[in-house]
Amino acid sequence: MAESGSNVTVLPRPAPRVEAAAFAAGLTTTLRRAGLPVPPERTGWLAESLRLVPPDSRDALYRTCRTVLVSTHAQLPVFEAVFSAVFDGRLDPADSRGDPNAPPSVGSEPRTRPTPPDSRPSVPHPVEAPRPPGPATTDRDSEGDESGSDDGPERDAVLAVASREERLHDMAFADLSDDELAGMRRLVQSITVATPVRPSRRPRPSAHSSARLDLRRTLRTAQRTGTDATRLVYAHRRTRPRRLVLLCDVSGSMEPYTRVFLSLLQGAVVNAAAEAFVFSTRLTRLTRQLTVRDPDQALARAAASVPDWAGGTRLADSIRRFIDDYGRRGVARGAVVVILSDGWAQDAPDEVAAQMKRLRRLAHRIVWVNPRKVAAGFQPLVGGMAAALPYCDAFVSGHSYAALQEVAAAIRADRPHPGEVRHTPSEMSRTPSEIRRA
């Protein structure tokens, strides 16, 4: 407060520093409890607005929240009462206690067009503004609380409320209920999967002289002028994303993760034109069955097409069938191959290593996703897993939604340059002979 003679200037109270997402979630939740219909998407709009234009005063914060959350004039009284209750509760009442020049709370300013009493919605009790204790109370205070109780627990406003989707991010797929599993499948299906790019095989004509000289087209043009090259033709190679191939283990040991992983396969097939295969005791191609966008229908079609669902695991035989029937014909050549399996195989480790070695010659990059990797004290001592690791470029868990983001990053990463160490984890350098000796 600054004084100049008899004039008193009241400086605006600065808005407290709050985390944008937490404040937006808490405020919109409190508004819904008060009866104001706030769509869920406006919570994200408010958080983004506070992040882009951080408010430097209480009034600026009020204007931002009102612009984003209020749709009609009839909603304004409820919003102003709830905002004043929630926001005043975050400030220290002692800062302005007893100060007649303190600025009024937002929403308590007189309006030129007052709302009729019968149409003014009432604010529920949990969001009433806390009143500082004092020796006397006004009539307005008496009307707001007939019992005179000033207990705090019912007046605390929740400002940080985690949404259901946020709670699912770090939950393991094996711990989800049926309702949570349905929500998780929708989340996983929306994961964007992108592969690194590669140059196209055929060059395309280019008008830029910085491109490579196309000698063949230049000579053909010169034939029209008696072998005089009057015009040079340039060409360049375009880039296109590499092919993505996903092989998912649907054996009995992978049952807690199968439905979520199939949603990942469906999203990759629909959005990234990927090739999808599942295997247990045999290999089954599911690319055509997963092209439908309805997740339940895609899962039903996939389950009907797999005769060995939740059976044993023939890892080496499934990889051999993939290479012989699809891989050598072009599906795996230069592609990013993702194998989702725990490595619990009935095949001998030498057979798994031999087939992984063949796949290594064809694929550009191999990513292995093992949901058991997150367990405490995990070591890849299972024969199939240990035999396959030396031929993998990345080894990730993928046991939760957050871990699947690491899977997407591993798919997007490019292959190391020659001379670089391909495997960073120590467990990925063990050979099958070392496993047998152990």
Image: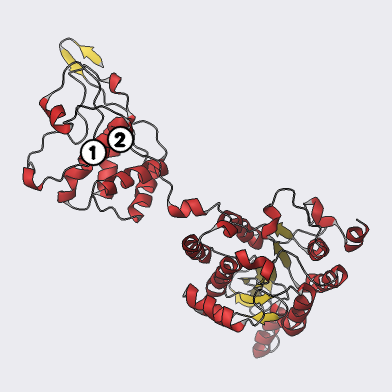
Relative horizontal placement of residue 46, taking residue 210 as reference (left or right): left
Which numbered marker is on residue 376? none
Q: Quadrant of the C terminus?
A: bottom right
In this picture, is 24 found above or below 430? above
Q: Nearer the viewer, residue 227 or 235?
A: 235
Q: Is residue 261 placed above or below 74 in the rendered structure?
A: below
**Residue at (71, 82) in percent of width and height:** 326
Residue sitting nearer the eye, 236 or 4: 4
The quadrant of the picture occupied by the N terminus is top left
Q: Are marks 2 and 1 in contact (CB under 8 Å)?
A: yes
Q: Nearer the viewer, residue 389 or 206?
A: 389
Q: Which residue is mark 1?
A: 125
> Quick check: 78 left or right of 313?
left
Q: From this viewpoint, is residue 116 visible?
A: no
Q: Position of residue 378 (x, y in %)?
A: 74, 52
Q: Position of residue 133 (x, y in %)?
A: 24, 20
Mark 2 highlights which residue? 154
Looking at the image, residue 398 lies above or below residue 289: above
Residue 136 percent coordinates (x, y): 16, 18
| Residue type pointed to by label 1 | His
Label 2 element class:
helix
At a point 38% along the width and 51% down the height, the residue shown is 44
